[in-house]
Image (cartoon, rainbow, N blue to C red):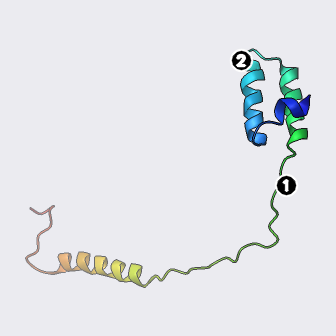
């Protein structure tokens, strides 16, 4: 009976979806029949084995250069210093 009921589906996922639509307790189905159907489906369509990875992929370590950041920091600091030291430049607070 198990093969006749669930064997005509394309794969395990389709059979489990059909069983859930027909037998789920939220739509008025019997919980025992629901779990029995899932067990039958697992017997008809055995779950696939999980792929095992034998080795981790190589890690690429990338070091970012701090040269650009340090140049920008120096430029900002120079601009702030220049605005304070150059005569005739006025800041917003002084206006």
Q: Report the residue marked by disc 2.
A: 27
Give the quarter of the image for residue 42: top right
Question: Where is residue 12 drawn, in percent x and y?
Answer: 79, 41
Which quarter of the rendering shows the N terminus? top right
Give the quarter of the image for residue 78: bottom left
| Mark closer to the chain start, 2 or 1 | 2
- The single residue placed furthest to the top in the displayed view is 28
Which quarter of the rendering shows the C terminus? bottom left
Point 36% across, 83% down: residue: 71
Q: What is the CA distance from the residue labelled 2 to the residue labelled 1?
A: 32 Å
Point 40% across, 78% down: residue: 69
Image mark for residue 49 = 1
Point 82% across, 71% down: residue: 54
- Tag 2's secondary structure? helix
Question: Where is residue 55 drawn, in percent x and y?
Answer: 79, 73
Question: Where is residue 11 drawn, in percent x and y?
Answer: 77, 43
């Amino acid at each position: 009976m198990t093969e006749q009921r669930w064997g005509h589906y394309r794969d395990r996922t389709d059979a489990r979806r059909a069983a859930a639509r027909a037998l789920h307790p939220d739509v008025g189905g019997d919980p025992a029949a629901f779990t029995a159907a899932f067990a039958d489906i697992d017997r008809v369509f055995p779950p696939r084995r999980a792929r095992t990875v034998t080795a981790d992929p190589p890690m690429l370590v990338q070091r970012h250069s701090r040269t650009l950041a340090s140049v920008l920091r120096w430029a900002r600091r120079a601009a702030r210093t220049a605005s304070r030291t150059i005569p005739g430049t006025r800041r917003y607070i002084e206006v």
